[in-house]
Each structure stands twice: as structure tokens, then as C-alpha cells.
Image (cartoon, grey):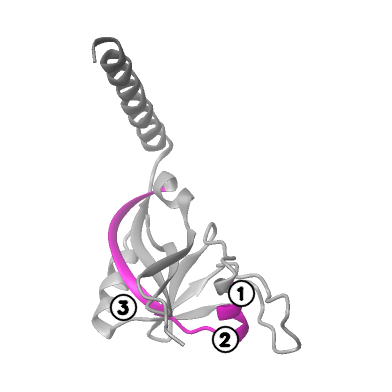
Amino acid sequence: MPRETGRQVIANNKKAYHEYLIEDTVEAGLVLTGTEVKSLRHGRASLADGYATEYGGELWLENVHIPEYSQGNWTNHAARRRRKLLLHRDEITRLVSKAEQAGHTIIPLSLYFKDGKAKVEIALAKGKKLHDKRQTLRERQDLREADRAMSAHLKQHG
């Protein structure tokens, strides 16, 4: 049976770009149980409240919701359990040392299958202040209005 290739996205953390300033991104592997993988293959997961913490020299993904597998039995997993991230030692130390600075945290951006293996894209992020969020929204709205004006102008004169 041929394995799928490429990147098959399961979940994105849309809130992350609004709430945080993304400074650095890293791809990490995940240690999962069988029922978690089956649940992910159905395209069900939520990264909204997820974050990563250092525990015992390793990086762990916490508060990411992977619902229980519907056909699972007593071997089913807990939906919000702590999951180990697979990273190189130097990546872990670099991320953790930067995350210890005030206002920084490590958050998941997207969860996907890459060549049949579950991967998560994590980011070193700094929390935005309220005025930063407003400015981001304003910039996005200005871009949208400029695009509308350009397309209206092109329709009239094109």
C-alpha cells in the first residue's frame, strides 16, 4: 500500500497570529498513541489553547485537544494529555532559553502529516499588547480597502 507524500494539514492555530508576534518556527515530531493517530487521520484536532513546556530536559506539548477515536475501546487516549515533542537537543535548549525571557512562549501553529508522520510546527512567540492587535487589524482592513479600490478601478478602466 503506497504511503501519501507531501503535507496534509490537520489543524491550524488561527488565533496564534492574532494573539502573538511569531519570532521563530521549528518543525517537531510527536509521540502519539494509535488511537490519537487514527483520530488525526479523520482530521480532528484543536490547537487553540496549546503551548509547549520544558519538563525533564524535554519539550512537551500541552492542552492540545485530539478527540477520542470513535471506534476506540479501553485503549483510547485522554483528549488533552501531555504529548512529547521530538526535537534535537540544541533546538530544545535554544527555544527554552528564548522562551524564558519575559513575554515569550512556545505555541503550536499547525498540526499535519508529512510523508505519513504526524508533525507539529511550533513557534517561539511574544504576546501582543492590545494596541498591537488593533494595529494589525487596522493594517489588514486598509489592505482590503486598497484591494477593493484597485479592483473597482480596473473594472471601470480595464
When asked about the image quadrant of residue 111, the answer is bottom left
Mark seen at residue 39: 1
Mark seen at residue 92: 3
Measure how far apart labels 2 and 3 are at the Cα level. Answer: 23 Å
N-term-proximal mark, 3 vs 1: 1
Q: Residue furthest top?
A: 156
The image shows residue 100 at horizontal and vertical percentages of 34, 66
Residue to which mark 2 is pinned: 33
When asked about the image quadrant of residue 138, the answer is top left
* SS state under label 1: helix
Answer few, some or many: residues within 10 Å of disc 2's Cα (few below 14, many 20 plus, some between 14 and 19).
Answer: few
The image shows residue 127 at horizontal and vertical percentages of 39, 50
In the rendered image, the quadrant that contains the C terminus is top left
Of badges 2 and 3, the one in the foreground is 2
Tag 3: residue type? Ile
When asked about the image quadrant of residue 68, the answer is bottom right
Query: As rendered, which of 40 and 47 lies closer to the eye?
Result: 40
The image shows residue 95 at horizontal and vertical percentages of 30, 70
